[in-house]
Image (spheres, grey):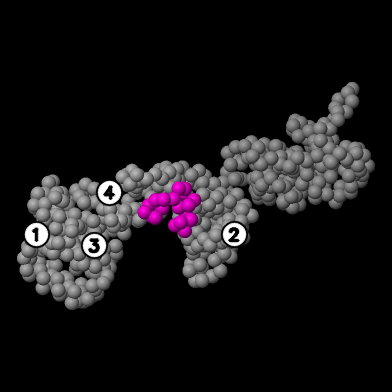
């Protein structure tokens, strides 16, 4: 007994059996039931959505001896004759292999004769866009005033290639792609009828690979019916597994270039098509962008519930600007692969540029980096404490707070690599630029001046010394040595510093900036010491509290409006 392919075995025989095209089947049934049948129809849509199937159902329904609600009975002699091909009043013509004028002339000559058995002569012309210009002109004359017993049904996947003069003489019906959910339901029904089982992940994979085509879904199912796992199905079909694609996205988000190179090496060793990987990774990023930029991703992303949940989780790892940059980079890589470039190196370079946008000179990459930095700075102002907690400053050695005179000095909680106290004191006495003699430094004991919560009134006053306060010109260089990015950017963009002897005051405009810098004061101290500025007493204050550090006759008076301090 001949074994039919699943898409042939389970081809719909009535309009009710057609899935996902109610916007077409319902009007056609109403036309047939009322007898208001047109002379020419145009069915358009992507492959495997039911154009030819509906054409055959329509041809039987209008000729059926016992129609019911616009449906063919498939039991009368006419329906059976059309199904088995014994009635020649219904003709199916492949325009891809019958493109010439003479083929259309044969139809024009044939329509002059009345049907032999059926009520209507039906001509189904598949892939009508393949006809030549001369053939279209000949068909146009036939479509203008055909006999009442003739019905034309034209089917095409590319309606834009059909002349407007032909389109204007046809009733047009556009077939939609089927959703993954709809295809999954049909596949499960077919498996049940066949007495076969597949796990849910495998069925979802087949439905996703069908790309909206019911016929493709059944064809793929026919190929993998005896396989047992999604991994086997992926290998059999030569596609990149969803798990690998999601892993690649996570590696890009974490800038894990080692894992990305290992992934490309694994695919290359298994002879995977790098162009297919690039296309499928681009599709994943397209879905992530849709999930990132829409309130209801499920309305624009056609995927299974499991995949949709994974896409939503991945969307939180990227900004919209980066996703646009990723899609453009993948598209450029795909074009390079089509020109015959080395596939492995092209894909490796692409993934490296995605994982490290700073390596790209592309304006989109620069915009993505700026956007990421802006978001981090916004997070600082919104909740400085959370940013400081998320990326704590490196633990640097601290000096003990001096104890009362009546009590012995407490033991330091942390010391510099267990250095002896004498070594610490010796390091604090290293000479620096613009510093007072060692004796003066020792007298002020700067290594113990770390109490940053002391009242502001105890800070050095302008009249306590003849030495004026001066701007610390090297603040940017010192800030560059701080690993904590928020602290570094605050010092560079929104702060200035003045110094006198061993006292350093960092001045900024907002209280939130002051609080953030105070929380990271040890990192700032470490940066000062890395710049050979030892034994400094560092405090942080708001700009409107710093008039005491600048005399009224000094260059830094009116510090709140001085552009040097950027206090607006």
Sequence-wise, the earlier of marks 3 and 4 is 4
Badge nearest the viewer, 3 or 2: 2
Q: Nearer the viewer, residue 254 or 375?
A: 254
Horizontal arrangement in the rendering, residue 238 relative to residue 119 (left or right): right
The answer to whether mark 2 and mark 4 are in CB contact below 8 A is: no
Residue at mark 3: 155
Q: Distance from label 3 to label 4 (Cα)? A: 18 Å
Q: Which residues are magenta?
A: 220-239
Q: Visible in this render: residue 227?
A: yes
- The crowding category of the residue bearing disc 4, from other C-alpha atoms within 10 Å (few below 14, some 14 to 19, many at least 20), is some
Sequence-wise, the earlier of marks 3 and 2 is 3
- Which quadrant does the C terminus fall into? top right
- Check disc 4 and report its element: helix, strand or loop: loop
- The crowding category of the residue bearing disc 3, from other C-alpha atoms within 10 Å (few below 14, some 14 to 19, many at least 20), is many
Q: Distance from label 2 to label 1 (Cα)? A: 63 Å
Name the disc covering residue 19, or none.
4
- The crowding category of the residue bearing disc 1, from other C-alpha atoms within 10 Å (few below 14, some 14 to 19, many at least 20), is many
Name the disc covering residue 265, or none.
2
Residue at mark 1: 118
């Amino acid at each position: 007994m001949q074994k039919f392919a699943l898409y042939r075995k389970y081809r719909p025989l009535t309009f009710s059996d057609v899935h996902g095209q109610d916007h077409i089947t319902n009007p056609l049934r109403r036309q047939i039931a009322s007898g208001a049948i047109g002379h020419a129809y145009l069915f358009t849509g992507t492959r495997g959505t039911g154009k030819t199937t509906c054409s055959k159902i329509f041809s039987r329904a209008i000729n059926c001896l016992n129609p019911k609600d616009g449906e063919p009975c498939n039991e009368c002699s006419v329906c059976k004759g059309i199904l088995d091909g014994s009635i020649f009043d219904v003709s199916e013509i492949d325009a891809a292999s019958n493109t010439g004028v003479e083929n259309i002339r044969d139809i024009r000559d044939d329509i002059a004769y009345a049907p032999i058995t059926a009520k209507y002569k039906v001509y189904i012309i598949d892939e009508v866009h393949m006809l030549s210009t001369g053939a279209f002109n000949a068909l146009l004359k036939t479509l203008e005033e055909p006999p009442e017993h003739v019905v034309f049904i034209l089917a095409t996947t590319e309606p834009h290639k059909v002349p407007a003069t032909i389109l204007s003489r046809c009733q047009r019906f556009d077939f939609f792609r089927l959703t993954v959910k709809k295809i999954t339901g049909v596949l499960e029904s077919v498996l049940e009828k066949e007495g076969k089982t597949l796990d849910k992940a495998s069925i979802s994979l087949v439905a996703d690979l069908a790309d909206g085509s019911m016929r493709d879904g059944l064809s793929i199912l026919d190929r993998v019916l005896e396989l047992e796992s999604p991994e086997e199905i992926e290998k059999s079909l030569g596609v990149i597994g969803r798990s690998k694609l999601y892993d690649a996205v996570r590696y890009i988000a974490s800038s894990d270039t080692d894992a990305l190179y290992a992934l490309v090496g694994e695919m290359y060793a298994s002879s995977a098509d790098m162009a297919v990987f690039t296309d499928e990774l681009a599709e994943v990023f397209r879905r992530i962008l849709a999930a990132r930029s829409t309130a209801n991703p499920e309305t624009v992303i056609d995927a299974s519930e499991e995949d949709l949940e994974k896409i939503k989780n991945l969307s939180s790892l990227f900004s919209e600007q980066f996703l646009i940059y990723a899609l453009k980079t993948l598209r450029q890589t795909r074009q390079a692969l089509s020109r015959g470039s080395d596939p492995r190196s092209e894909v490796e370079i692409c993934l490296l540029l995605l994982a490290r946008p700073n390596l790209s000179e592309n304006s989109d990459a620069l915009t993505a980096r700026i956007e990421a930095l802006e978001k981090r700075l916004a997070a600082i102002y919104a909740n400085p404490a959370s940013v400081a907690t998320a990326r704590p400053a490196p633990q640097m050695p601290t000096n003990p707070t001096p104890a009362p005179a009546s009590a012995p000095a407490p033991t330091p909680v942390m010391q510099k690599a267990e250095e002896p106290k004498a070594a610490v004191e010796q390091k604090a006495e290293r000479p620096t630029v613009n510093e007072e003699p060692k004796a003066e430094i020792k007298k002020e004991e700067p290594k113990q001046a770390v109490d940053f919560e002391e009242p502001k009134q105890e800070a050095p006053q302008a009249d306590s010394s003849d030495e004026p306060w001066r701007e610390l010109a090297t603040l940017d260089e010192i800030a560059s040595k701080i690993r904590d990015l928020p602290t570094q950017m605050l010092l560079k963009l929104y702060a200035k510093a003045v110094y006198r002897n061993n006292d350093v005051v960092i001045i900024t405009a907002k209280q939130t900036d002051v609080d953030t810098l105070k929380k990271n004061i040890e990192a700032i101290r470490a940066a000062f010491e890395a710049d050979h500025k030892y034994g400094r007493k560092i405090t942080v204050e708001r700009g409107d509290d710093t008039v005491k550090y600048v005399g009224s006759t000094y260059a830094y008076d009116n510090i709140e409006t001085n552009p040097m301090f950027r206090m607006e």
